[in-house]
Amino acid sequence: MKNIYKERIREVFPDLKINQVEINDTGQNNDVIIVNNTLVFRFPKYIEGIKKLEKETKVLDHIKGKVSLPISYPQYRSFDPYEVGKVFTGYPFIQGTPLWPQTMNEINNEEQIQDISSKLVEFLSELHFQPIDNLDIKKQSVEHIHQSIVGLYDNFKEKLFPYMNKKSKSEVSQSFEDFLANDKLLNFNTVLIHGDFGASNILWNSKSKSISGVIDFGETEIGDPAYDFAGLLASYGQPFLQRCLSLYPEGGKILERINFYKGTFGLQEALHGFDNNDLVAFKNGIKEYR
């Protein structure tokens, strides 16, 4: 696989000297390879992944130089032909490793924890309050978000409920129906969001003891700011979330939406696995509901 990708990069960028190539990760949407230990290239695995990468590239062009943390800005890109195995982007390797929950739990210094929360909230604030009028991606209204939640619920019932136990089906149904019936929860302005703002995409420099960057904007969209905080809740728990919300404008008003979104993450992973014949993703997502 890596030789195929190596030749594709050479075909598009013949002046780029490639001395070393290694597979870094196989994610849900992309194969990721490291070139010369300095560049990260992402090749979408599905047509849907290509669409996400194209949207991501537009967003990264839009926010370049406007956010305080390093981002995975694509210096190399190819969208022609628009085919799996041909489309890719490449960006300079950002030093650091994902800020996994275990790493966060091992940080006992109050000043460091406060610095992490303030830097993450500063980044999200910069992103969420970014002007979007000239951004050429689909702009979701609150009504669209409502319909997408209805669609997600329908998909869960049709595709995942057959694999879930009775109690789980009842709890999921109650959660969705309560949320969709509460008009007050859908009273917000849509903004530019990261869309997958969790541990795997927040990089940590263990030497400097600081956040070193944010990667993978593949799920970015005009959506609900609460969704990004749901990623923080899923990764680092309620106390850290509350710390972050205290730093975010009117953060307390989005808590109920945050909790709802967080409760859908496992089944969203299972749904991705179901739709894309990814058995590992399906099993990981559905295991707590069987």
Image (cartoon, grey):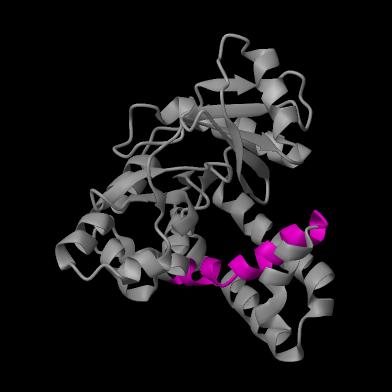
Decide if residue 45 is in sight here.
Answer: yes
Q: Along the line of sight, which residue is nearer the eye, 275 or 136?
A: 275
Residue at position x 46%, y 53% in the image: 197
Figure quadrant of residue 14: top right
x and y percentages locating residue 198 in the rendered image: 46, 57
Q: Along the line of sight, which residue is nearer the eye, 45 or 249?
A: 45
Q: Is residue 86 magenta?
A: no
x and y percentages locating residue 261 in the rendered image: 54, 66
Left or right: 173 as drawn, with respect to 70: right
x and y percentages locating residue 264 in the rendered image: 61, 69
Left or right: 4 as drawn, with respect to 59: right
Picture layout, residue 288 above or below residue 118: below
Picture layout, residue 164 above or below residue 105: below
Residue closest to the far front: 19
Q: Along the line of sight, which residue is nearer the eye, 126 or 250?
A: 126
Figure quadrant of residue 239: bottom left
Residue at position x 27%, y 58% in the image: 117
Which residues fall within the magenta stretch? 256-277
Decide if residue 133 is in sight here.
Answer: no
Q: Does the magenta stretch include residue 257?
A: yes
Residue at position x 37%, y 42% in the image: 213
Residue at position x 80%, y 53% in the image: 276
x and y percentages locating residue 225 in the rendered image: 44, 53
Residue closest to the far top: 15
Magenta stretch, main secondary structure class: helix
Q: Along the line of sight, which residue is nearer the eye, 3 or 247?
A: 3
For the N terminus, the quadrant is top right
Residue closest to the far left: 111
- Total marks shown come to 0
